[in-house]
Image (cartoon, coloured by chain):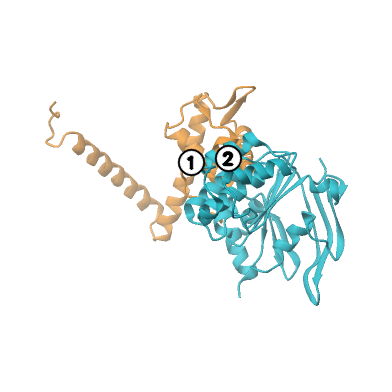
Chain colours: A cyan, B orange
């Protein structure tokens, strides 16, 4: 199959601030991709643009051969770095909400994941710890059957146990026909699950490489390369 | 299962070595079924494509074979397993000799030292089995 996602010359300016400057890359199907960069480097903005939630200032995107638009929105599941549930909700309300909202929502998969994540659907979302909340957000995002999942900092600020659970879930629920782009600044914890990584610096992709190639060619871990590129 | 991985080296090679060590040590017997890509990826929390690559390489080396519809199995060919043992021993030997040479030992000395060390090790093993030189009771 051709590239699942084609991003071509995407730029985004907020007033005078240029957040993204000519970002281009292709992602094939069945890939686990890391989008890496320091905080505030534009990762979230890029994901929001790909998800169709924010317009780009320039450039174009195509998903599964279709130019980005209404059709392609339904091919993408986006998990933002902030919870999207309402404070009055219980876990089961959040699930029901997603189920109503998205035709591609897989209730059975959601229940399986809730079980795996040890989430009780009767709990109110406001009493969930940060780690439990992340698990819920991930469940919601991954229970949709789509081609492209965009996860914005899925393990940020979360305890090591929840981190492990989340990585475990990502690997378990992986499918060969869909891809995941995961943004993170916690490289060491996540580098083993990536096929390829992209480094976003000053609004540009400065590196896009298969992870095992980095290790073979340069004898370096992604974490080391990250520190080299983004270190002071 | 938890293995210590070095993120500076290709992960697929490290998993290959891990599986080979399991075969050589007998933890995996000839003809044993090995976990699926999914199972192993979830166990180790590693990208499934990396596991896939590991298995492809192991198949290419005929260490592992796929039985269509059934899964992947360790080879039942003893000669293949012996070949893996020799290959891994070769690695150990290479590192050892290199290390000894760096310490300044000449090749003749290395052989002598190894002979003495092996004898000492077997002596220790025998002592543990028969502490008084007599058959153990019970």
How far across and down, in percent of the image, does residue B7 sit?
55, 54
Is residue B53 something that shows in the picture? yes
Left or right side of A83 for B105 = left
- The residue where tag 2 is placed is A113
- On the same chain, marks 1 and 2? The answer is no
How far across and down, in percent of the image, does residue B125 sit?
24, 38
Q: Tell me the distance, in whole angstroms, between the alpha carbons under discs 1 and 2.
A: 41 Å
Which residue of the protein is positioned furthest toward the bottom in this rendering?
A16
- The residue where tag 1 is placed is B88
Chain to which the residue tagged by mark 1 belongs? B
- Quadrant of the image occupied by residue A172: top right
Asked which secondary structure carries label 2, the reply is: helix
Q: Residues within 10 Å of mark 1 (few under 14, many from 20)?
A: some
How far across and down, in percent of the image, does residue A53 sit?
78, 57
Left or right side of B50 for A15 = right
Camera-near label (1 vs 2) is 2
């Amino acid at each position: 199959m051709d590239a699942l996602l084609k991003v071509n010359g995407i730029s985004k300016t907020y007033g005078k601030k240029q957040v993204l400057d000519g970002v281009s890359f292709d992602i094939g199907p069945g890939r686990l991709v890391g989008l890496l960069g320091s905080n505030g480097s534009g990762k979230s903005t890029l994901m929001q643009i790909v998800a169709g939630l924010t317009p780009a200032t320039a450039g174009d995107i195509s998903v599964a051969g279709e130019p980005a638009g209404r059709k392609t929105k339904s091919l993408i599941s986006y998990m933002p770095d902030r919870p999207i549930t309402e404070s009055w909700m219980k876990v089961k309300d959040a699930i029901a909400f997603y189920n109503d909202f998205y035709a591609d929502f897989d209730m059975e998969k959601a229940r399986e994941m809730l079980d795996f994540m040890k989430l009780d659907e009767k709990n109110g979302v406001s009493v969930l710890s940060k780690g439990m909340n992340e698990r819920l957000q991930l469940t919601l995002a991954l229970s949709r059957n789509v081609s492209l999942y965009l996860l914005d900092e899925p393990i940020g600020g979360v305890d090591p146990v929840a981190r492990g659970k989340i990585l475990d879930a990502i690997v378990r629920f992986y499918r060969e026909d869909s891809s995941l782009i995961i943004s993170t600044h916690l490289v060491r914890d996540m580098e083993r699950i990536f096929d390829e990584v992209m480094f976003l610096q000053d609004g540009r992709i400065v590196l896009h490489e298969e992870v095992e190639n980095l290790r073979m060619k340069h004898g370096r871990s992604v974490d080391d390369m990250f520190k080299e590129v983004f270190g002071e | 299962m938890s293995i210590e991985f070095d993120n500076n080296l290709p992960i697929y090679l490290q998993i290959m070595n891990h599986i080979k060590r399991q075969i050589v040590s007998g933890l995996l017997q000839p003809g044993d079924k090995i976990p699926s890509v999914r199972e192993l990826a979830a166990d180790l929390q590693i990208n499934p494509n990396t596991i896939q690559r590991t298995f492809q390489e192991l198949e290419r080396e005929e260490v592992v074979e796929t039985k269509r519809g059934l899964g992947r199995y360790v080879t039942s060919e003893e000669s293949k397993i012996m070949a893996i043992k020799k290959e891994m021993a070769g690695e150990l030997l290479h590192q050892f000799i290199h290390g000894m040479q760096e310490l300044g030992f000449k090749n003749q000395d290395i052989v002598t030292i190894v002979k003495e060390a092996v004898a000492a090790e077997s002596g220790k093993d025998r002592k543990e089995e028969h502490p008084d030189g007599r058959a153990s009771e019970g």
